[in-house]
Image (spheres, rainbow, N blue to C red):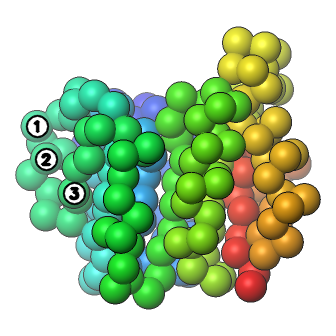
Amino acid sequence: MTYKGIKAIRCPFDYVIYQMIINEVKPDLVIEIGTNIGGGALYIADLLDSNGKGVLHTIDIVDMIDPKVKEHNRIKFFTKGWEDYDLTLTKGFERILIIEDASHSYKDSIGILNKFHEVVSVDSYFIIEDGIINELGLEKEYDGGPLKALREFLPNHPEYTVDRKWCDMFGKNATFNVNGYLKKMI
């Protein structure tokens, strides 16, 4: 997939879902963990433009970002990884949505869930991408991946629920984000 000619690695179904979630939540801050080339970041920033508000903090460990993406005024780039992201940067924002699209390893997924879960706003989402790796038989390469992290995280965090509305919109878990649309309820 590409967005405006820039590589954007997401399932087309998820692009549609993201558009609907961002329209519904109207976040003033989206944190995307895993920038890569930046097509997804540009898409999210354009969705924020359509809402007339919001900024995107996009985090990665390297800077491979297309120069066109760097021109968007709603995007702030962080290239020292999620572990070094300063959570005080979320202060002053009322509606925060997070997208976890890092390495897909269990270690990173559970680390990101544990670090960022408190800053997600009530009635917003913590989207955990690429649980599809388990469905593809790749969980061993990722030490169980995002789904293992979700199975560990959710029983200890009753404030979150898997929102079946998004996971099953196009058929049961017809998404790369298998069981990964977590809605913060309280």
Taking 178 as reference, is 94 left or right?
A: left
Circle 2 crowding by C-alpha within 10 Å: few under 14, some 14–19, many from 20 = some
Label ID, residue 76: 3
Residue type marked 3 = Lys
Report helix, strand or loop for mark 1: loop
Residue type marked 2 = Lys
On-image quarter of the N terminus: top left
Residue type marked 1 = Pro
Taking 139 as reference, is 6 left or right?
A: left
Locate residue 75, reporting x and y percent: 22, 58
Q: Give the Cα separation between the discs numbered 2 and 1.
A: 5 Å
Residue at 10 percent of width and 37 percent of height: 67
Res 185 → quadrant: bottom right
N-terminal of the pair, mark 3 or mark 1, is 1
Above or below 174: residue 23: below
Residue at 71 percent of width and 37 percent of height: 146
Residue at 42 percent of width and 59 percent of height: 31
Q: Which residue is mark 1?
A: 67
> Residues at badges 2 and 3 in contact (C-beta under 8 Å)?
no
Q: Which residue is mark 2?
A: 70
Q: Give the Cα separation between the discs numbered 3 and 1.
A: 13 Å
Judged from this view, the residue extending furthest toward the top is 141
Report helix, strand or loop for mark 3: strand
Image mark count:
3
> Residues at badges 2 and 1 in contact (C-beta under 8 Å)?
yes
Q: Give the Cα separation between the discs numbered 2 and 3.
A: 8 Å
Report helix, strand or loop for mark 2: helix
